[in-house]
């Protein structure tokens, strides 16, 4: 499986981005420990992992603590060693599945229960897992993150680029991609 992984950290001097290796990681806690080592004094550390142009995983640490994880599709854990490493311990879906959920991919940020009077737009084939609220305080609410991941034609790299542009580290990640 091919993957791209970028560690993005915000410290006193602002955002910085660096390539990140998942090689020889034993579990998600090991990955989190490596993310802490990128900048031990960082206020915020994010890891964006894109797998096979089909899956996206975002990990977040606040001041090195409180690991939060979001995955665009639970299938990544079944199809890849890296997916199992990052998402294998996550059992809860990204939203409550007791009610049908409609994600409006044309209007990011809109998530609602299905209305019986109107035909809902198609629900994405993906099965997002984890914490879709992990970027809310940075300007990407859960509904917007879910809509970006569900939007037809959006690759994980497109989602990463849009998220990073919104939170203020788009240039750093783009430079890293081009290197």
Image (tube, rainbow, N blue to C red):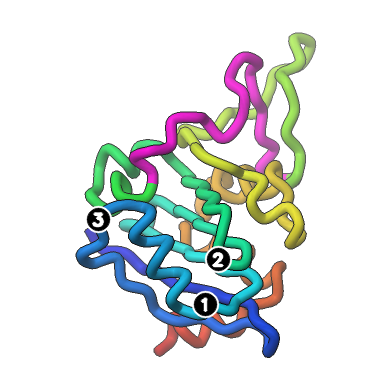
The mark lying in front, picked from 2 and 3, is 2
Q: Residue 26 got which mark?
A: 3
Dot 3 lies on which element? Answer: loop
Q: Residue at x 76, y 57 (%)?
A: 137
Dot 1 lies on which element? Answer: loop
Disc 1 target residue:
40
Q: Is the residue marked by circle 1 packed among few (<14), some (14-19), or many (20+) residues within 10 Å?
A: some
Dot 2 lies on which element? Answer: loop
Disc 2 target residue:
64
Q: Are marks 1 and 2 in contact (CB under 8 Å)?
A: yes
Could you tell which of marks 3 and 1 lies nearer the N-terminus?
Answer: 3
- Quarter holding the N terminus? bottom left
In the shown orientation, is residue 32 left or right of residue 2?
A: right
Q: Position of residue 161 (x, y in %)?
A: 57, 69
Q: Quadrant of residue 94?
A: top right
The mark lying in front, picked from 3 and 1, is 1
Magenta stretch bounds? 87-106
- Closer to us: 145 or 135: 135
Q: Position of residue 102 (x, y in %)?
A: 66, 28
Q: Are marks 2 and 3 in contact (CB under 8 Å)?
A: no
Q: What is the CA distance from the residue labelled 1 to the residue labelled 2?
A: 7 Å
Q: Residue at x 70, y 75 (%)?
A: 168
- Closer to us: 2 or 151: 2
Q: Residue at x 38, y 38 (%)?
A: 89
In reply to whether residue 46 is colored magenta, the answer given is no
Could you tell which of marks 1 and 2 lies nearer the N-terminus?
Answer: 1
């Amino acid at each position: 499986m091919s993957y791209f992984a970028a560690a993005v950290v915000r410290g006193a001097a602002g955002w910085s981005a660096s390539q990140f290796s998942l090689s020889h990681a034993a579990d998600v806690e090991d990955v989190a420990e490596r993310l802490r080592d990128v900048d031990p004094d960082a206020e915020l550390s994010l890891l964006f992992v894109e797998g096979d142009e089909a899956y996206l995983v975002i990990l977040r640490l606040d001041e090195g603590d409180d690991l939060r994880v979001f995955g665009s599709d639970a299938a990544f854990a079944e199809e890849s060693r890296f997916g199992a490493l990052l998402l294998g311990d996550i059992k809860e879906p990204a939203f409550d599945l007791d009610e049908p959920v409609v994600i409006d991919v044309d209007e990011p940020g809109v998530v609602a229960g299905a209305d019986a009077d109107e035909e809902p737009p198609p629900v994405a084939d993906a099965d997002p897992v984890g914490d879709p609220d992990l970027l809310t305080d940075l300007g990407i609410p859960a509904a917007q993150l879910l809509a970006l991941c569900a939007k037809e034609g959006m690759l994980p790299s497109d989602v990463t680029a849009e998220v990073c542009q919104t939170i203020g580290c788009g240039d750093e990640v783009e430079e890293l991609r081009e290197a």
